[in-house]
Each structure stands twice: as structure tokens, then as C-alpha cells.
Image (cartoon, rainbow, N blue to C red):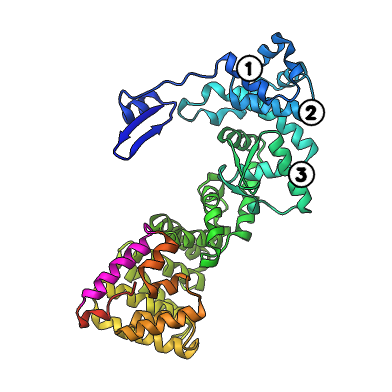
């Protein structure tokens, strides 16, 4: 454990790597010893329901030594003993029935730069004893654990789990996993987490039995079904799901399947972009574009959507020349495939106008926004959200901004992000957070708008 002081207080680091601790905190390092026999026995006593089982010190000490006095192994062992109401000697027999070769296989991934190498067998052994029991008595609980092994082990929403025959069966299955100390619950039992080592050994168990790829595919299918679009109303849900979508998408087993899930990946990229995580979104958008070009060709509608998405996230990062190239490609393709007045084509017109404005290419900017506005008023009507966006972008005077604001409040509501584009920084900061890139650019745009010359106003993207 290492400590570093700053003007704002102390920062506490914990690590098994002593060299890293010294690098972070110099001499301010405190060694935390492993759990000693006395402490391990006290943990065991508190967790065990039947205290009379501790009367035989010889058996108790032998079991704790076999568990290496590790809190996680002790917790899993006592959970099994409590759940099945067996003696310590009977549990030791169960541990002994697991072959050493099996334990070594299950513990292979624990090594992780050496930090878990010495604890692989106790945790793997207690996990296996409990898992085999769960697998026998509740297939849904076993399936849930296998599913959780394919996503991020922390903060798993109950709503992300596959559907069961009834709500009662879901409660029973999750209750069994909690009873065996495989998962812990927070937030009124609606959020679950796995210890990292439980997550690792479950993945390794599935891999050694050639089931991991199958479960990754099941997890991908589930997330493909439930992962929402990046719209404002679903923001809380996709923020909860996003860490799990990214864990799955970055796993080696998913790579062989990803061509079947480009829609899911595109939505993931869109949520990252909406959250201001532009670099991560760009990586996913490029990957999706390559997949769609291979599968569908350059003129496919979905491929052109990927071109447009990539252009948008490049513009968000200030890569305006690259963004312009993407938007010109998307516009030319959409004009050819969809026609000049299709809403997607007009979106490309607007996007190209915005990125041209950022580069002060004034001759094209106003023409682009005029074309966009006239087309949207004709196709979608004057009060459609996309039309109001175009009004806002074209805005040559304060009256145009007021028109956009009033229309957006009426159609979208007062706290929708597009309404906040017109209301500007204050409310936008409240909803997105002051550190979100859009909130920062909103404030900057207001300052620029106030100080700009009349000739320059038409080329500013409104806040």
C-alpha cells in the first residue's frame, strides 16, 4: 500500500507490485501482510452459521491451511458449507476429489504478471466444488454465471441478463449465486458484481471445456437485442450497458463473430460518441466501416451510414480535413443511392456544411445549409427536429436562434440535447456535465458568437 500527498489530500494506492508502489510513492510504502491463521480463523468463524463445527481445532486448521487463509476462498467454502449443512471434514473430502491437473488448468489465467500465481489452487478448488453443485441444482444460475463471465465483472445490471421462464426463477437463480458467494449485490439487488478471480476461473472453466465461444456468442446475441440507440431518453440504460458491451467487443472470442454484429457495434460507437469518448468511438466506427464495405460494398446504405458516422466523430476531434472527405463521400453515395432529397442525403449536406464552416470555407457553407433547410422543410415539415437543427445551423441573426429554440422546446422538450444546443451552455452543462466535450464547446461557441463580426456569424456552429 502506497500513499502520495497533494494539496487536495492524500491518494492511496494498493498493489501487489512493490516496484510499482515505490515508483508511485517513494518511501511512503506500507506493507500489508497476508491474512494470518488467527485472522483467517476469525473470518471463518464470523461467516460460518454453525459455530459448533469449529470445535475440532485440528480439522478447522487443516481446512484453513488448505484454503491458504485467503478471504475469498474462505468465503466460498463457508458459503457451500452453510448452504448444504455439511461438516468441515466432508467439505475437505470434496476438495480432495478435485484433481491437481484440473486445478492447474482452472488457475492458468490467475498468474497475471505473477500477482495471483500463489493463490490459484485454493480459489479454483472452492469455486469448482460450488459450481458443480450449482450446475446440478439450478441450470439457470449456472447459465447466469457463464453469461457474466463474458462481460465486465463489475456493476452488472439485472436487466442485462437473459430472460427466464419467470421473474421468480430469476430471483431464485440470483439468490443461489449470492448464497454461494459467487456474486454480490448492490442497489436494491438490481446490480451485481463478481470477484475478479471468480470471473477468471469461470472463463477458464468454459474455455477448457470448449464452451466459452458458445457463451460469448450467446452474450453477443443478448446485447445485440437489448443494447439501445444513443438517443437521450435511453442515456441511463446505455451508460449502464456500455462497459459490458466494450468488454465483450474487445474479447478475443468475439473477433471471430463480429461481422454478424456490426449493428450492435455501431450503436456502441454511437453511445461512446454521445458520451464524448471520441477516440474510442472512432476505432469502432472504422472497424464497422471495414466490415460493411467487405460484406455489402461501398454503395450500400449501411456502409454510407458508417462513412457518415466516421466523419462526424472525426469532426468532433477537430480532424476537419479528414471529416470533410468522409462527409463528401457519404453525400455523393447517398445522392446516388437515395436521391438528393432523402433525409439521409440532407443530413450529409448539413454535416458537410458544418465541417466546411470549421475550416472557413465560406463560399460553400451557406449554400449547403440553405439546401439542407429547404429540403427538410419540403420533406419533413417546418417543425420536424431535423428541420429545426438546420434552422439553428443557418442562423444569421438572433431571431433565427429563437425560432430554433421555441420549436425544439415544443417538439423535443426543454432538456433534450438538441434543445440545449439552442439554450446553450448553462442547461447543457447540467445534463451532460461540465467536462463533456460538447458542454465545453458550447461555452466556447457562445464567446465566439458574441465577439464575431457580422460576416463571421453565419459560419459559427451554434452552441
Residue 5 or residue 196, whichever sits in front: 5
Q: Is residue 78 above or below residue 198?
A: above
Which secondary structure lies at badge 1?
A: helix
* Residue under label 2: 84
Quarter containing the N terminus: top left
**Residue at position x 59%, y 25% from top?**
71
Q: Is residue 2 above or below residue 270?
A: above
**Residue at position x 56%, y 28% from top?**
108
Looking at the rendered image, the disc whose residue lies closer to the viewer, 1 or 2, is 1
Q: Position of residue 161 (x, y in %)?
A: 66, 51
Residue 41 is tagged as 1
* Residue under label 3: 172
Residue 151 or residue 284, whichever sits in front: 151
Which secondary structure lies at badge 2?
A: helix
Q: Dividing the picture into quarters, in which one does residue 322 lie?
A: bottom left
Q: Position of residue 209 (x, y in %)?
A: 67, 36
Q: Position of residue 347 (x, y in %)?
A: 43, 78
CA neighbours of label 2 inside 10 A, class few (<14), some (14 to 19), many (20+): few
Q: CA distance from mark 1 to mark 2?
A: 20 Å
Quarter containing the C terminus: bottom left
Q: Is residue 245 above or below residue 17?
A: below
Q: Which residues are magenta?
A: 434-452
Residue 449 is tagged as none
Residue 11 or residue 208, whichever sits in front: 11
Q: Is residue 441 magenta?
A: yes
Amino acid at each position: 500500500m502506497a500513499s502520495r500527498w497533494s494539496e487536495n489530500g492524500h491518494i492511496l494506492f494498493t498493489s501487489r507490485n512493490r516496484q510499482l508502489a515505490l515508483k508511485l510513492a517513494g518511501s511512503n510504502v506500507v506493507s500489508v501482510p497476508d491474512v494470518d491463521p488467527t485472522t483467517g480463523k476469525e473470518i471463518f468463524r464470523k461467516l460460518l452459521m454453525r459455530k459448533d463445527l469449529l470445535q475440532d481445532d485440528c480439522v478447522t486448521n487443516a481446512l484453513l491451511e488448505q484454503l491458504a487463509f485467503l478471504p475469498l476462498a474462505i468465503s466460498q467454502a463457508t458459503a457451500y458449507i452453510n448452504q448444504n449443512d455439511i461438516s468441515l471434514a466432508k467439505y475437505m473430502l470434496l476438495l480432495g476429489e478435485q484433481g491437481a491437473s484440473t486445478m492447474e488448468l482452472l488457475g492458468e489465467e490467475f498468474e497475471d504478471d505473477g500477482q495471483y500465481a500463489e493463490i490459484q489452487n485454493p480459489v479454483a478448488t472452492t469455486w469448482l466444488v460450488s459450481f458443480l453443485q450449482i450446475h446440478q441444482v439450478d441450470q439457470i444460475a449456472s447459465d447466469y454465471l457463464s453469461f457474466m463471465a463474458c462481460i465486465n465483472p463489475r456493476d452488472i445490471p439485472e436487466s442485462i441478463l437473459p430472460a427466464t421462464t419467470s421473474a421468480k426463477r430469476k430471483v431464485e437463480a440470483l439468490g443461489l449465486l449470492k448464497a454461494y458467494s459467487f456474486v454480490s449485490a448492490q442497489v436494491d439487488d438490481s446490480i451485481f458484481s463478481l470477484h475478479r478471480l471468480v470471473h477468471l476461473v469461470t472463463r477458464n472453466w468454459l474455455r477448457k471445456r470448449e464452451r466459452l465461444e458458445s457463451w460469448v456468442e450467446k452474450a453477443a446475441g443478448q446485447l445485440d437485442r437489448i443494447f439501445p440507440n444513443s438517443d437521450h431518453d435511453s442515456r441511463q440504460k446505455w451508460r449502464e450497458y456500455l462497459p459490458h458491451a466494450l468488454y465483450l467487443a474487445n474479447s478475443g472470442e468475439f473477433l471471430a463473430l463480429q461481422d454478424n454484429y456490426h449493428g450492435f457495434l455501431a450503436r456502441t460507437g454511437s453511445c461512446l460518441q454521445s458520451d464524448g469518448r471520441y477516440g474510442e468511438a472512432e476505432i469502432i466506427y472504422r472497424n464497422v466501416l471495414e466490415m460493411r464495405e467487405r460484406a455489402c460494398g461501398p454503395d450500400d446504405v449501411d456502409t454510407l451510414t458508417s462513412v457518415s458516422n466516421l466523419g462526424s466523430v472525426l469532426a468532433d476531434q477537430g480532424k476537419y480535413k479528414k471529416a470533410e472527405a468522409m462527409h463528401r463521400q457519404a453525400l455523393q453515395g447517398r445522392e446516388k443511392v437515395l436521391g438528393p432529397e432523402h433525409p439521409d442525403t440532407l443530413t450529409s449536406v448539413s454535416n458537410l456544411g458544418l465541417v466546411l464552416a470549421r475550416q472557413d470555407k465560406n463560399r460553400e457553407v451557406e449554400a449547403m445549409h440553405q439546401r439542407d433547410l429547404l429540403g427538410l422543410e419540403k420533406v419533413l415539415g417546418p417543425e420536424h427536429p431535423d428541420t429545426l437543427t438546420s434552422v439553428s445551423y443557418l442562423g444569421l441573426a438572433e431571431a433565427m436562434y429563437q425560432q430554433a429554440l421555441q420549436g425544439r422546446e415544443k417538439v423535443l422538450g426543454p432538456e433534450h440535447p438538441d434543445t440545449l444546443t439552442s439554450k446553450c451552455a448553462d442547461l447543457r452543462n447540467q445534463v451532460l456535465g461540465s467536462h463533456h466535450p460538447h458542454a465545453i464547446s458550447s461555452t466556447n461557441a457562445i464567446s465566439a458568437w458574441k465577439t464575431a463580426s457580422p460576416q463571421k456569424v453565419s459560419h459559427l456552429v451554434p452552441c
